[in-house]
Amino acid sequence: MSHPSILVVDDDSSIRRIVAEILLMEEYEVVTAPNGAEALLAVEHERPALVLLDMRMPVLDGWGFVQGLKERDIDVPILVMTAAQDTARWAAEVGAAGHLAKPFEMSELLSAVERLCQAG
Amino acid sequence: MSAFQLLQLVSQLLFVLVAVAVTLQTIRRPLKASLDTALLFAVVALLVAVGWIHQLDGVKAGRWENAVTGSLLMAIPYMLVRLVDDFTTMRRAIPGAAAVGLAASIVSLFVFPPPYSGILALLLVFYFAGFTTYVAVAFVRASRGASGVTRRRMNAVAGGSLFLGLAILLAGIALATPGAAKTEGIIISLLTLLSGLFFFLGFAPPVWLRRAWQEPEVRGFLARAASLPRMPDLREIVHELERGAAGSLGVANAAIGLWDAEAGLLRYNAGHLLRESRADQMIGGHAFIAQEPVFSDNTERDDPAHADLYRKTGARAIMAAPITSDGKRLGILAVYAAHAPIFADDDLLLLSLLANQAAVILESRILIDEAARVKALEETTRLKDDFLSAAAHDLKTPLTTIVAQAQLLERRARRNPGEPANLEGIESLVTESQRLKRLVLELLDVARVEQGKLVSYREPLDLIELAREVCERHSTPLHRQVLDAPGRIVGNYDGARIVQLIDNLLENAVKYSPEGGEIRVRIRQDGASASLTVADPGIGIPTADLAHLFDRFHRGSNVDDRQFAGMGLGLFICRGIVEQHGGSIWATSAGIGQGSTFHVVLPAAEPISVTPRPHPISLAVEQAG
C-alpha cells in the first residue's frame, strides 16, 4: 500500500480540484465524484483506502452514500469534510473515522488522511 | 262558598296583591313605566275593593258611585295605551285619542243615568274594546321586533290585553242576553284572572321569571363563548360578544368599546354610529372610569352633551359595564334601548356577568395573539439562525479553496523554487477570492437593508442611460438583451445602487433562462414615476413563491440549489434598493417553465411640458383684478 487510493466526494468543483491536487502532490492516488451516487460507482470500481466525504450534495447526499455502502456491504473509512457547523455530529451519525471542518489547513488535511490510511 | 265565588275571590286577591307589589316597585324606582303599571293595577284594585265593600254592607250602589266605578273601568284601556307608549314606539295621535275617548266616557257616565241607552253602551264598548285590541296588536308587534326576554314580556302583555278584550266582549254579550249569566260570569272571572296574571308577568316580571326568560339566550351565549377566542378576526369576536349580550338582555343593540391605552380612547367596531370616544365621555365612559356598572334610564338627561347622538342611535336607556380582567382594563360593554322599561335593575348584574365573560374571552384572545407573536419571533430567530449557518457555509466553501490553494502554491514554490508559476492555481485563487468578496459584499448589503442605509447619495440621473450601460455589459450572443426605452427619464437616484439593481435582475434573468433566450428590458415614464420591467423566457416562478420572492434568504422552490449557486439575497437587496428609493418591486410569472417578469416602479421627475399650462392665464386675470 505505497500509494493508497483516495476518493474525494464534494459537489464544489474547486474544492474537488484543490483537494485532489494536494493529495496528488503527496503521491496518493485520487478519484473524485461530485455526489453520493457517482461516489458509490467509484467505490465499487476503485476500492479506495479512504473516502473524503462532503455531506450536503445533490442527487445523493453523504447519508445516502453511507447507506449505499452498507447495502453493498463495503467497509471503508470515511473522513467527513463539511463547511457546516454540525460537522462533528454528522460524522458521528454516519460512523465516520474522522472529520474535518472547512476551511481546513493543508497540513490538517494531510495529517488526517495519513493517519486514517495507516489505520486502514 | 261556591267554586265560582272562590275563583272570583282568588282573582280579586291577585289583583290587589299585584297592585301592592307594583306600587312598592314604583316607590323604589319611580320610572314612568312603573308608575303607569302601578296606576293600571291600582285602578283594578280599587274596582275590586268597591265590589267587596258592597258585598259586605249589601247596599246597592248608587248612581254616582256607578259613574265612578264605570269611569275607573274606562280608564283601563287608556292606561294600557300609556304602557304601549312606554315599551314601544307608536303614532303620537293614539294616546291623545285614548285620552279623548276616556274623557268622553267619563262625562257621559256622569251625565246620563243608567240604564244606558243602546247607543251609549255601544260607544263605551267600542272605545274599550277598540283600544284594548289596539294595545294587544301593538304588543304583538313589539314582540316581533324584540328578542329574548323582551319578546317574552311583550308576548305576555299582548296575551293579557287579549284576555281582557275577550272578558269585556263576554260582559257585553252577558248584558245583552240575561240568560246564562252564571257560566259567563265564571268565564269572565277566569279571563280577568288570566289577563291580570299576564299583565303582571309582562309589565313587572318578578326577578326569578326574568332570569328564567333570559336563561336560553345566556346559556346559548355561554355555550358559544368557549370557541370565541379562536375566531380569526378580533372584530368578529367583538361582534359575537355584542350579539350575545344584546340577546341575553333582550335588546336590539349592544356595543363593545375596546380600550386603546396609547390613544386614550375606547374604540368601537364598524357599524356603530360612534367609532371612538374618550374614556371620560359618554355613559360607557362613566362605567370605564368608575370601573363599575352604570345604568341610565334617561341618557339625554344624564349626559346632555351627547343628547343628539343618543337620540340618533335610539339609545334612551343605556346599561354599561367595564370589561376588566385581573385589574387589566380592556374596555366596556354597553347595551342600549329606545325604551327604559326594557331594562330592570337586576339586569345590571347580568350585564356585569356578561362583561366578565367578555373579559375572559378577550383576555384569552390577547394571550393567543401573544403566543402567536412569540412564535413569529421564534420563527424569525430560526430564520436568522438558518441564514447565519447558510451564510457561514457559503463563505467557508470559497475560503477553503483559497486557503488550501495558497498553501499548496507556497509548498510547491518552496520545494521547487525553479518551477514556473502554477497559473491554473493562481487563477483559481483569483476566482475564489472574487466569489468570496461578492458574498461578503452581499452580506454587508443585507445588513444595510435592515438598517435602511442601503441608498446613500442621490443625484439627478437618467434611468435609461444607467440601464443601457448595464444591458450592454450583460449582452452576450447566448443571452441577447433587448432594451426598449424612449428618450430620457430623469430621477433622483443613487446611481451605483440602481446599476446594482438592474445588474442583479439581468443576472437572474440570464441565470434562469435557456441559452438563446431573449431578455427584454422595458422602461417607461408615467407621470411622476418610472416603470422598469425585465422579462425572461426562463424557468418561471411557482405562484406560491411569488409572495416570498423578495424575502431574505428565499429561493424559488423550483430552483435547484446546486444548479444555480446563490444565497437568495439578491432579490432581498433589490427590494431594499427600490424601497429606499421610494419605489416598489414585484414579480409575475405564468408558472413553472413560463418565464418571469420583474416589475420595478421608481419615482421620477415629471417630464417638462413644452405646451403652456392654463394657469398662467388665470394668474393674469387675478393681476388685472
Image (tube, rainbow, N blue to C red):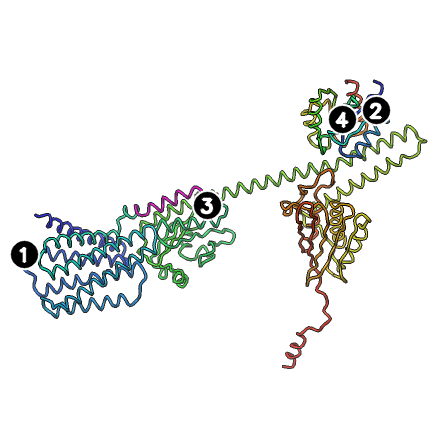
Mark 2 lies on residue? A29
- In the rendered image, residue B212, in percent from the top left (x then y), is placed at 30, 45
- In the rendered image, residue B209, in percent from the top left (x then y), is placed at 27, 47
- In the rendered image, residue A39, in percent from the top left (x then y), is placed at 75, 27
Q: Are marks 4 and 1 on the same chain?
A: no
Task: Provide the major secondary structure of the magenta segment.
Answer: helix
In this view, the residue farthest toward the bottom is: B624
Give the amino acid type for the residue marked by disc 2 in the picture.
Glu
Q: Secondary structure at mark 3?
A: helix
Give the amino acid type for the residue marked by disc 3 in the picture.
Leu
Label 3 neighbourhood size at 10 Å, few (<14), some (14-19), many (20+)? many
Q: Is residue B215 magenta?
A: yes
Mark 3 lies on residue? B362
Kindly identify which numbered label has been placed on residue B248: none
Kindly identify which numbered label has been placed on residue A41: 4
- In the rendered image, residue A43, in percent from the top left (x then y), is placed at 76, 24
Instruction: Measure the alpha-carbon separation of dots 4 and 2.
Output: 17 Å
Q: Earlier in the sequence, mark 4 or mark 2?
A: 2
Disc 3: which chain? B
> Which dot, 4 or 3, sits closer to the camera?
4
Q: Earlier in the sequence, mark 3 or mark 1?
A: 1
**Residue range corresponding to the magenta coloring:** B212-230
Instruction: Measure the alpha-carbon separation of dots 4 and 1.
Output: 127 Å
Q: Residue at x 33, y 45 (%)?
A: B215
Q: Secondary structure at mark 1?
A: helix
Mark 1 lies on residue? B57
Instruction: Measure the alpha-carbon separation of dots 4 and 3.
Output: 64 Å
For residue A62, side relative to residue B340 (left or right)? right
